[in-house]
Amino acid sequence: MSPQAPHDTLLIPGPIEFDDAVLQSMSHYSESHVGPAFVATFGETLTLLRKLFQTTDAASQPFVISGSGTLGWDLVAANLIEPGEDALVLSTGYFGDSFSDALTTYGARVDKLAGPVGGRPQPAEIEAALAQKRYKLLTVTHVDTSTGVLSDLRAVVRSVRKVSPETLVIVDGVCSVACEEIAFDEMQLDGVITASQKAIGCPAGLSISMFSGRAMEAFQRRKTPPGSYFASMKNWTPIMKNYEANKPSYFATPSPQLVRALNTALKQILAKPLAERFQKHVEASDKVKKAIADLGLQIVAAKPEDQSHAMTAIFLPEGINIPDVLPKLLSKGVIFAGGLHKEIATRYIRFGHMGVSVTDSGRGEIDKAIQALGASLEECGYTKA
Amino acid sequence: MSPQAPHDTLLIPGPIEFDDAVLQSMSHYSESHVGPAFVATFGETLTLLRKLFQTTDAASQPFVISGSGTLGWDLVAANLIEPGEDALVLSTGYFGDSFSDALTTYGARVDKLAGPVGGRPQPAEIEAALAQKRYKLLTVTHVDTSTGVLSDLRAVVRSVRKVSPETLVIVDGVCSVACEEIAFDEMQLDGVITASQKAIGCPAGLSISMFSGRAMEAFQRRKTPPGSYFASMKNWTPIMKNYEANKPSYFATPSPQLVRALNTALKQILAKPLAERFQKHVEASDKVKKAIADLGLQIVAAKPEDQSHAMTAIFLPEGINIPDVLPKLLSKGVIFAGGLHKEIATRYIRFGHMGVSVTDSGRGEIDKAIQALGASLEECGYTKA
């Protein structure tokens, strides 16, 4: 039996639609956070995350902590860089700017390298910036949820390795993990932080991350204590290691229900090859992008190589406003999000295409949304130029 | 239909047993964190918290943030005290000591005043300590989950008002909110932090707190920025005010499912007078304490006036160990917790009596646990001296 009452289809760039089995796991009966059944489930979940991130290096360390995706920034900023050290933030929208704020909160000195709105910094700029000073870490937003701009992680790592090989490469993968390709070891990433409610397909409430052995060593070499208590790797690392070794452990009470739901979501994802999953997201994205071109509309991420496969930020036609379009979409059972990037917020809408809406084609949600978008614009008086 | 498969009764001091309707809310279909339905639910939840904390002062500010109860310590330590300022921590167990660690993480200077194991600091000691220096804030653990020691909030506030009226009084109410009496305005509290999974009766994953107008003014007067990004009151206060005013707002994605479950739990609690709820917890606690006395066992909180009504920490008889007793209890369908206070951890067990196990007497869980405890000890060879 489905736990879901009939409802409008949520196609914002997170939270996404969730599978019935995942939602059923959310209502699991209460259990002890240190009891054997939950300890086994939590431990298995951490191991499943290694598979999702495609890391087999035993030194890689997964973390699952109650919190929003934002907590991942604190985890990085309070543990992997010390006050007075330098960070280079590659910004492709709102979320790069906010990651920068999190870093400065804990005393890091931040240089921000931003692409034009809808674009991203280029390798030559990144290399020039890296050559200026010794950066402890560099952050890159894999997919910026505010713009739908995709970063090229392999190119970024190449630039870092060429100019400043010791700089840690930290990826904000909130809107990319489980839909864009992330091969943690092969890409030589040092950290990926994400959240549960986007392509992973588990309700919001978990900060999920993976750090490399190199990052964990950098943490161990800190001269100052971590800048946060709740987001302290010193407090959490032994807990995560114990749970994964099937031993109960306590720092702060995890959420058994959310961890059960994450476990269910990860098992669904890993039941099929990840390459197949990524390809399905590419195909759904291509379909969306073609439909938008057919409608004569522009995408915020102007160049095809800058466009994420997780979501699409769509400029509205001249004279048609967000408060005109979103209610018309809703009347057709489709929920999109408004704009978020401050320079263009009133001029575009966001269409998330991640998770079961993409992988379970029987739901028909992407096609329904494409049709609803065309019909809504038509009702607003739009005709293709 | 119950979402709960048959399961052993969880009577640890949190997470507690949850009501079916609360668990059903956990599997609510996915919805936008800024959509009108969720905004209304979140706003109402914040207003319901004012009722739970018994505050009608419009300047009081509730916060509901994804995280563990521990996050509440960061909220206090990173916002209400500045580096180099002094805090007085009244410790009655493990959790007072940890609150102290959280405060020093953000640069506060901490003096700790601890009672003997199983006891609490007395008014004369508190007043003597307060007279020594100008403390920005004092923290008191209402019920320490590691010992079951209850603090007397009214007496603590009296001491503070007498000696150092400007000192903020911050209560760790993780194991007391919704079972021990908390009258926020009348008791003149400045802050109470708690979590969802104890007497409030909502699955773990939410940090819940209430701060007074005086505390919020102290925050506004900070000379340095907050020490945390994710736990920053600067980032969260406008969000909470907006949601409560029924306006969508964004800093970090909340968990719609957990907030729905909290909403359900609060409505259940507030459907009856709070005084009646507190009284039921007193009666259940009295019954447990009497049964323990009848068994000839000692309680960690030795004096009756120091004993919480949320839980009971019970010394095991000489020669009987935790690994002997807990499996026997489990075989009778009852889950208790082991010890947590480092000086006596191996010598006692903890029995949580909060929430539906107490208020829904039809569940019969307290009586079942009392019987199971007696039978288990007997099977271990214990006979009352």
Image: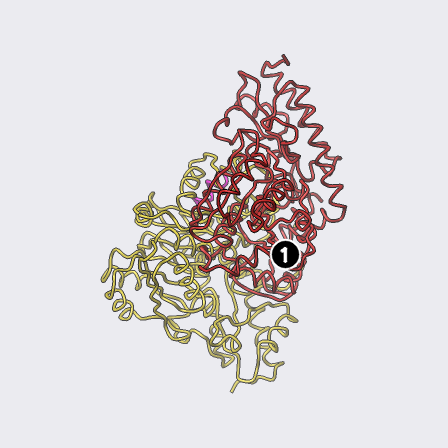
Chain colours: A red, B yellow
Residue B268 coordinates in the image, percent (x, y): 50, 50
Chain where mark 1 sits: A
Mainly helix, strand or loop, the magenta region? helix
Q: Quadrant of the C terminus of chain A?
A: top right
Amino acid found under the numbered disc labelled 1? Ser
Say which residue label 1 marks.
A60
Which stretch is magenta? Answer: B40-48
At horizontal 59% and vertical 60% (from top left) the residue drawn is: A240
At horizontal 75% and vertical 42% (from top left) the residue drawn is: A275
Q: Is residue A315 above or below residue B268?
A: above
- Does the segment drawn in magenta span residue B45? yes
Residue B16 coordinates in the image, percent (x, y): 54, 60
At horizontal 62% and vertical 32% (from top left) the residue drawn is: A306
At horizontal 42% and vertical 36% (from top left) the residue drawn is: B245
Q: How many marks?
A: 1
Residue A73 coordinates in the image, percent (x, y): 51, 47
The foreground one among B261 and B125 is B125
Dividing the picture into quadrants, the one containing residue A144 is top right
Q: Quadrant of the N terminus of chain A?
A: top right
Residue B300 coordinates in the image, percent (x, y): 45, 75
- Does the segment drawn in magenta span residue B14? no
Could you say whether the residue bearing mark 1 is in a helix, strand or loop? Answer: loop
The foreground one among A65 and A342 is A342
